[in-house]
Amino acid sequence: MRLKTMRRGLLGILVLAASLMTTSSPSIAASQPKDPVVLVGGLFGSGVLTQPAYWPIKARLVAAGYDVHIFTTPDYGIGGASDNAALLERFVDQLRDATGAQKVDLVTHSQGGIIARNYIKNFGGATSVDSLVMMGTPNHGTVLAAAADEYLGCLGGIAGCVEHDPDGAFLTELNDGDDSLGEVHYTAIATKYEELVLPYTSIHLDAADGNITNVTIQDYCPYRFVEHGSYVVDGAVFTGVLTALQHKPFAMNCWAF
């Protein structure tokens, strides 16, 4: 009887010790919550009526455990990156207040990356953004905008067109100094099959500035056909976006759909 009592007492001590070790062990501490993600769409795609174009990537991010919000512009991006960067600042501040998050991640497509970079550089976003992932963003312009500006006056001076001129005042100012600011992690994803941002290498930033990862999809998946409009629906690209958000070495699953 006494032996059974001693065994029970010993078992209780072991259970208590295990419980204390479990609750205090840093190896199994609760993981940090993910930053909220803000999706910023491109020219003509960032309005209320066209935002469904970004529902596929939003659904993938939600399935991966992210709290995702789509930023829309009242002018569908036509009015340019300055006014819309100010609106993005307000959107992010309201989101941080609502969620209690210190920082957000920005996942952008095309002109959305220009708006995001302008927000980071000129509207205080460097302290509010953890990662900026850009897909098909004309960071150094596109010859199509230069031609449209020279021969068509960018259809009456549409800011969303003028600002994409490689030699224009807007990009000259935006790219003056370091391409990366603060502790923001920048990822610029390009495809060799670009038909709008030409040359496709103008999507890339100056990696020498630090905190920048430049990606060409076909360097990872040589036979992957992705053009300007399909970044946001391509499964392989999405797997790369995830590694960027997780601050892991960039990688893509070429078999993902």
Image: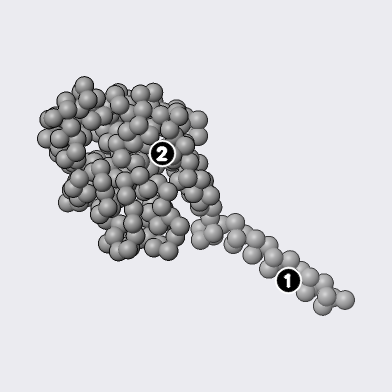
Could you classify mark 2 by the number of other residues whose Cα lies within 10 Å: few (under 14), some (14-19), or many (20 or more)? Answer: many
Which quadrant would residue 15 be assigned to in this image? Answer: bottom right
Query: Horizontally, is 92 left or right of 213 in the view?
Result: right
Instruction: Give me the residue at 48% from left, 41% from top.
Output: 55
**Residue on which the image places disc 1:** 10
The residue lying toward the viewer, choosing from 23 and 217, is 217
Tag 2, which secondary structure?
strand
Rendering coords of residue 122 (x, y %): 25, 29
SS for callout 1: helix
Say which residue appears at 78% left-offset and 73% top-offset.
Answer: 6
The image shows residue 38, relative to residue 239, as above or below, that is above
Taking the spot 35% from the left edge, 41% from the top edge, the residue there is 108
Horizontal side of residue 61 vs 191, given as left or right? right
Left or right side of 196 for 172: left
Answer with the quarter of the image where residue 158 lies.
top left
Name the residue: 11% across, 35% down. 167
Q: Quadrant of residue 162?
A: top left
Residue at the spot of label 2: 39
